[in-house]
Image (cartoon, helix red, strand yellow):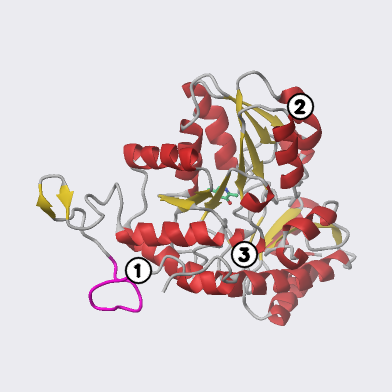
Amino acid sequence: MTVQATDKFATKAIHAGEHTDAHGSVIEPISLSTTFKQSAPAQPIGTYEYSRSQNPNRENLENAIASLENGKYGLAFSSGSATTAIILQSLPQGSHAVSIGDVYGGTHRYFTKVANAHGVDTTFTNNLLEDLPTLVKENTKLVWIESPTNPTLKVTDIRAVSDKIKSLNKDIILVVDNTFLSPYLSNPLNFGADIVVHSATKYINGHSDVVLGVLATNDKAIYERLQFLQNAVGAIPSPFDAWLTHRGLKTLHLRVRQAALNATKIAEFLASNENVIAVNYPGLATHPNHDVVKKQHRDALGGGMISFRIKGGAEAAAKFSSSTRLFTLAESLGGIESLLEVPAVMTHGGIPKEAREATGVFDDLIRLSVGIEDADDLLDDVKQALAAAQ
Ligand SMILES: *Cc1c(COP(=O)(O)O)cnc(C)c1O
């Protein structure tokens, strides 16, 4: 059975990347062998030779990712960060990149502390769409978007950026980090992105038990270059991690939809609470980019991530964070369980206060990764923690 182009998301999630084996196993076995038999020199029996180059579990996962992102090709790596590193390593020496300002901390670190050592220079902007024509130089090769951003959840119009790049008539690839939405809520390749990347550690695996990265593209030349680097660098996931991620992916549509519905309920409550200064949630009609959300997200859903400013400063944020029963205080996101964190002292603690506050990351900002527990129980937990914090 192979999925058809007309199959809907849920069907693809369950069946894309399906394997066949001699036993007719319904669920794919984990293939741990590092090497594969050959019948004559340089004549492998099947399609595999050595597990760094390709492995059945990784290949099935890569095919599933490609299918869910409406791409022709998928690739998996040992982490989201390794995926980013491989894409940036694919640029010629002396290239220039333009990135949105508040990208994931590790992406910012790679751009500024690693890629520059390999001769790739990056300009950051908080106003990508307007600034792009003036920021693009002779050697600009790549534009990097993350949408929604972390942790203030600003949404970028991918189609508008893609059109602007095309109007410049230059050889620039557009990369979108789609980690916060997952392929269920948005498919950036549909809006003109050349590569979509994910930290599958988050929603795609979804159970907070695997670190892994993936990308998808429709461009054969880009795919072949990145696949070459995947093998040359060797930053590949283990067969077991690929298998677990593929298993997690099969329920992506159920998990992400429920997380988004739960988050909507909580965001609406926070927006009307007197102890909350401001709420960032793309699903609210009051979100500054909600018109883009309507075009770019499935059913205009806002995803599972919320951030909000609590009255009472850093002290109230700390009190809230240690008063929840169901939300666990921890970094990361996108799992079945609800998490919360205080970005100013946790994920974004390394950014100087002034730069941090310029993007909206104040000391009183709390980030929620809303899980798939019962919505009313989660809401009650937020209510009692808000009360405890005052
Ligand atoms: C976590 C994350 C990454 C990095 O992924 P790892 O799997 O932790 O290496 C990149 N981008 C975003 C948006 C993330 O949340």
Q: Residue at x 60, y 20 (%)?
A: 139
- The image shows residue 90 at horizontal and vertical percentages of 47, 32
Q: Amino acid at mark 3?
A: Tyr
Provide the residue span drawn in magenta: 19-30
Can residue 201 be seen by looking at this rendering?
Answer: no
Q: In this figure, which residue is indicated by the disc labeled 1? A: 19
Residue 29 in which image quadrant: bottom left
Left or right of 123? Residue 87 is: left
Number of the label disc, if any, that sits on residue 133: 2
- The image shows residue 59 at horizontal and vertical percentages of 37, 57
Number of the label disc, if any, that sits on residue 184: 3
Sooner in the amino-acid sequence: mark 3 or mark 1: 1
Q: Amino acid at mark 2?
A: Pro
**Residue pushed farthest left?**
40
Q: Is there a contact, CB below 8 Å, between mark 1 and mark 2? A: no
Left or right of 367? Residue 243 is: left
Measured Cα–Cα span from mark 3 to mark 1: 22 Å
